[in-house]
Amino acid sequence: MAAVSTRSVRHAPLFARGWGNWIFLVPATLFFVGYMLYPILRTLWLSFTDYRFLRQAPANFIGLQNYQFALADPMVATGLMRAAVFTLIFLPGMIILPLIVAVLVDRVHSRPLSTFYRTVLLIPAVIPGPMIFVMWRLLYNYEIGPINTVLVDVLGIFTRENAPQWVGNPSLVIPAVAFFEWWWGLGYHTMLFLAGLAAIPKDFTEAARIDGANEWQVFWHVTLPRLRPILAVLVILRFGTAMAVIEEYLIFGGFNRALPTYTWTVYMYDLAFQIGEWLQGYAASIGWLGAIGTLSVTALLLWLFRNRDDR
Amino acid sequence: MSMQATISQPTTQSRSRRKLRLRASTVLRHVVINIFLLVVVLPIAWIMLLSVKTLPDAYSGKLLPTEPLTLSHYDYVLTRMPQLTQNLTNSLIVTIGSIVATSICAVLAGYALVHLKTPGRALVITICTATLFFPTRLLSLIPIYEIQRAAGLLNSVWGLILPYVTLNLAISILVMRGIFEQIPSELAEAARMDGCNAWQALFLVMLPLITNGLVVLIIINFVTAWGEYLFAATLTNDQSKRTLIVVLARAFGGVGQFSWPRLAAAYTLVIVPGVVIFALAQRLYFKGLTEGAIKL
C-alpha cells in the first residue's frame, strides 16, 4: 500500500469538502425525490383540484373547495375521531408494557438466558404485518377461535351464546386491534428500551441504592429520567404511525363505514381507489387534513418533551 | 427507607434476609418475564398446531386435537395450489430486490454522511428524520399509482421494487450512519494516506467492518418488503402478479380451498423463513444493534 502513496495527492480531493461527494448520495436521492418528495407534493397539488382518476380529464384548480367540503364532511370528522380513539388506547400500552419487560430483562444476569428472552420476544417483530392481522383474525374468531374457547370452555366466564365478538362488535374491534399491535410491537420496543437501559452507567443506580433508595425510587428518579430521550422519540413516532394506521383496518373491517375501523385513512383510500370515479383530488385533501392534524399534535408532543435541563 | 439503616450497619441477619428477598424478587422477575414470553409464543403455537389438525378438529372449537395430527394441509398448499408458488416467487423477487437496492443506497449515503465532508449533511439527516414523523406512505400512494401507470409498471412484480425502496430508505440511512459513526475516522484517514480514493476506502477498508450493521439493515428491510400490503394490493391487480402476503391477507378463512387449517399451513410457511433467518442471524443482529444501529 505504501508504494502507491504518491497517488494520494491525486485522490485527495475526493476526501475533501466538495459536492463531488454527493455522488454517494445520488441513488438515495433519486428514490427519495421520485417516490417520496414528488408524490407528496403532487398530492398537495391534487388536493386543490377536482381530479377524478377514471374521468380521464385533466385536473382543474378549484382552490380550497375540497378542504371546505372535507371540513363539513361528517365522515372526515368521524374518521379522525376514530383514529384518535385507537391511538389513545394503543399508545400507553405500546410504551408501558415494553418498558416493564425491558426493566425486568435488563436485570437478568445470565447471558444465555438473557439472549433467549430477547430472541423469543423479538419473534413477532419478524412476522409480516398482514400475517399478524390474519392470524389474529383467526384467534379472535367468535365461534372457534382459541380466545373464546379459553373464555368459554376453560374459564367459563362466557357461554357460547354471549361470548365476545372481537371483530364484529364495534366497541370491541378497536381494543382488539390495539391488543395485537402491542403483541406485535412488544419485542421491538423492549429492545429499544434495553439499548437505552444499557447506556445508563451502573454506578448511578448502585449509588442510589447505597443511598437507601428502594427499587421503585431507583426506577423513578434515576432510570426513567435517563430514558427520557428514547421515551420521547417512541411516543412521538408511535403517535404518528397509530394515527395513520390503514392496513389493519382494511384487513379487519374492509370498507364497512359502520365499523370504527373505517377511519380517515380508509376513507381516503376508499375515495381514491374504490368509490365512483375515484375522487383523488378530494381524497388528497383528506390525506393532507389528516397529516396536518397529526403533525400539529406531534409538534405539541415535541414541545412537551423538549429539553428542560435548564430547570 | 428502612434499608438505609441496614446498609449502614450490616448485620449477618439482615444480610441474609436481604439475600432471601433478593432471591424472591429474582424468581418473581423470571416468572413475569416468562408470562410475557408465553403470551408471545402461544398465538403462534396455536396457528402451527391448527395447521396440522384434521378438518373436524380444526372446526371443533377445542384447543387440543382429538384425532392424529396430519401434514396433509402442507401437502395441499404446496402441491395443489400452484398459484401460491407463483405468489411466493413474486414475494421473493420484490423482497430481495428491495433489500439490495435499499442497502446500496443506505450504505453509500451513510458513508458519505459520516466519513466524507459532504456539504448539506445536516440537511440530509434532518430530512431523513422528518420523514419518520410524516405519513409518507399515505400521502404518496395516489401519485405513485399514476407514476407506475405512466411507466407501464402497474401490475408488475419488478415495478413494485421502486416504491418499496423508499419505505425504509430514511431509517436505513440513519441506521448506517450510526454504524459508520462507530468506525474511527483515523481509519479513513489511514486509508487515504495509503492512496485509497473514497470508493476504495469504502469497499476495501469499511465494508468488512459494517457486516453487523448490514444484518440489521437486511432484517429491517426484509420484514417491511416481505410483509408490505398497501402498495402491493393497490399497484397489482392480477392474482398471478400479487405477492403472497396480499393473496393470503385477502383469502378469508372458511371452507373449500382456503379452509382454516390450510390457511394456517400457508401462514406458517410465510412466517417460518423470517423467524429462521432471524434466529440464525440473531447474534449478529444484537451486535449490530449495540454497535449503534439503534441510535435513531
Image (cartoon, coloured by chain):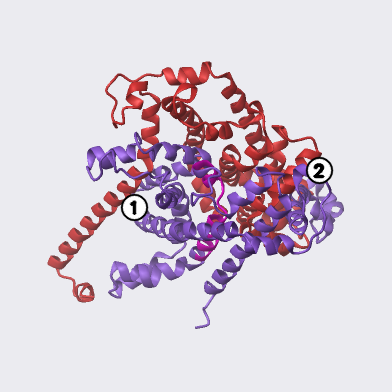
Compared to residue B133, the image places residue B9 above or below, namely: below
The subunit carrying tag 1 is A
Q: What's the colour of chain A in the image?
A: purple
Q: Is residue B78 magenta?
A: no
Q: Secondary structure at mark 2?
A: loop
Q: Alpha-carbon neighbours of circle 2 within 10 Å: few (<14), some, or many (≥20)?
A: few
From which residue to which does the magenta span run?
A232-252
Horizontal relation, residue A214 to residue A295: left or right: left
What chain is colored red? B
Compared to residue B24, the image places residue B37 above or below, namely: above
The subunit carrying tag 2 is A
Residue A220 sits in quarter: bottom left
Secondary structure character of the magenta stretch overall: helix
Residue positioned 55% across, 51% down in the render: A245
Which one is nearer the viewer's eye here, B20 or B101? B101
Compared to residue A109, the image places residue A213 above or below, namely: below
Is there any visible trace of residue B115 in the rendered image? no
Q: Do the CB atoms of the residues marked 2 and 1 lie less than 8 Å apart?
A: no
Residue positioned 48% across, 18% down in the render: B76
Image spot of residue B286 (x, y percent): 49, 47
Residue with the mark numbered 1? A109
Image spot of residue B296 (x, y percent): 58, 58
Image spot of residue A117 (x, y percent): 37, 46
- Give the residue at the far bottom of this rendering: A311
Q: Alpha-carbon neighbours of circle 1 within 10 Å: few (<14), some, or many (≥20)?
A: few
Residue with the mark numbered 2? A56
Which one is nearer the viewer's eye here, A234 or A89? A89
Is there any visible trace of residue B289 in the rendered image? yes
Q: Secondary structure at mark 1?
A: loop
Q: Is residue A236 magenta?
A: yes
Say if labels 2 and 1 share a chain: yes
Q: In the rendered image, which quarter contains the N terminus of chain A?
A: top right
